[in-house]
Amino acid sequence: GYFGKFGGQYVAELLIPPLKELEHALKHIVPTEAFQKEFSDYLKNYVGRESPLTHCPTLSKDLGFNLYLKREDLNHTGSHKINNVLGQALLAKHMGKKALLTETGAGMNGVATATAARALGMDCIVFMGAVDVERQSHNVRRMKLLGATVVPVESGSKTLKDAINEALRFWIKEQATYHYCFGTAAGPHPFPTLVREFQSVVGKEARRQILERTGALPHSVIACVGGGSNAIGIFSGFIDDPEVQLIGVEAAGTGEEGCTNSAPICLGTDGILHGQRTMLLQDDDGQILPSHSIAGGLDYPGVGPEHAHLNDCGRAIYVKVNDCQALNAFKALTRAEGIIPALESSHAVAYVLENKDEFPKDCNVIVNLSGRGDKDMDIVEQCTELF
Ligand SMILES: CC/C=C(/N=C/c1c(COP(=O)(O)O)cnc(C)c1O)C(=O)O
C-alpha cells in the first residue's frame, strides 16, 4: 500500500478489520470477469460512458495549439466522482454491506454516492462541512432529493478535512453494515489504489481517443488535484508513456504570499493525515493547517499519496493556480466554447491559459474537465466583474 515512501495504513486498530476486508475484495472480487462486466455495464448504460474528448476550436486558435477536454462533466451526476463510487458501491454490495457513507466537499461526491446508493437499493449518509453545505447548496438539495441523509460537520474548519474525520469516526462504529465510499484517491491503503483502479477508465478512454483523433500521443495531460482522483485517473492512461508530460494543478487560494491555500505538494511538507503518509499543510508541530480554495472540492490540506510520489520521482509536475485565475478560466471556457466548468476543473484550464508559451505551437494538450459548474453559480455571480 505504498507509493515510494508515501501511502500506508496509519489508522486506529479499530479500522484495520474493514480495511483488510476491502483489501481482500480489491484482490479477489474486482479482478473477476463478473465484477468487471457488471461495472462496465453500469459505466456504459447508467453513467453514459464513454465521455467525449472535445476539441476547443476558439481557445485553440488563441493558444496556438490544440486544447482537448476529457468530458467527465458529461457523466451522469456531472463529474468523474460517479466512476469511483459506482465501483465501490458494487463492491460493497458484493461484500454484503447494507448502506453507504461518504464525505463530500464540493457535493459532487455526495451526489454521486447518493445516486449510486439509489441505483443499487442502498441507504446513504453523507458527511459535509457546514461551510460547504452553505457554498454548494445546489448539491445539498440534490442529495436530499435522492434520499440521502446529509450530516453537516461543525468541527474544525467545517470543510472536507473535517467531513473525513467525522466519516471515519462513523465508520469505526458502523463498519458491519456500512461501506465507506472514500471519494478520492487518498486515505489509508487500499483506498488510493481502489479509487485509482475505478478512475482508470478515464485515462484508458482518453489515450485511445487522442490517438484516434490526432494519430499521436498528447504533449501534456493536465488535471486539477484536490485529493487526486480525477488526475490519477487520467494520468494512469499515460503514465507508461514517458514522452507525455503529466501536470497536476493545485489550488493556491487567494494567491498572496503566505495566504491560506490548498497546495500541499507545492507549499506543504511530508506528514501523516487520514491514515496516509503524504504531503500536507501543517505547522512545525505537525498540526494540520486550515486550507482554502474558492473550489470546495480542492479545499483540502492533504493529497493522495501517489501524487506525492509522482512529484518526488519527477514523473509528474505539480503547479498551482489561484482563485482569480480559476474564475477567469471559468469565464473564458464558458464564453469561448459554451461549456460551463466546475470551479475545480477551471483550475486545470487556467493553468493552460496562463502558461500558453510553455506549450509548443500546434501541439495537442488534454485537460481533464472533471465536472460541470451548475453548483458554482452563486459563487461566480458574487464575482460580478466577471460577467
Ligand atoms: C471527496 C471530496 C471531493 C469532492 N470533489 C472534488 C472535485 C475535484 C477534486 O477531487 P479529486 O479529483 O479527487 O482531486 C475535481 N473536480 C470536481 C468536479 C470535484 O467535485 C466532492 O465532495 O465533490
Image (spheres, helix red, strand yellow):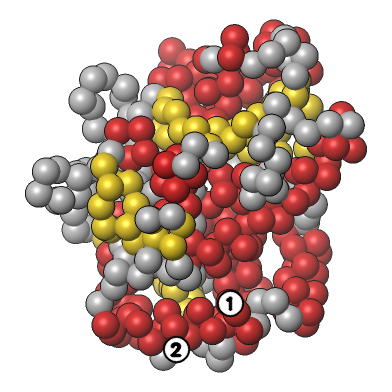
Q: Name the foreground residue: 353 vs 77.
A: 353
Q: Name the foreground residue: 252 vs 166.
A: 252
Residue 130 visible in the picture: no
Q: Residue furthest left?
A: 285
**Element type where label 1 sits in the image:** helix
Residue at 75 percent of width and 43 percent of height: 206
Residue 76, percent across and down? Answer: 68, 55
Question: Residue beneath label 2, please?
Answer: 177
Residue 51 visible in the picture: yes
Residue at 11 percent of width and 43 percent of height: 284
Q: Quadrant of the N terminus?
A: bottom left
Q: Quadrant of residue 311?
A: top left
First of labels 2, 1 by sequence position: 1
Residue at 19 percent of width and 58 percent of height: 155
Residue 344 vertical placement versus 349 (above, below): below
Question: Residue beneath label 1, please?
Answer: 26
Q: Quadrant of residue 90?
A: bottom right
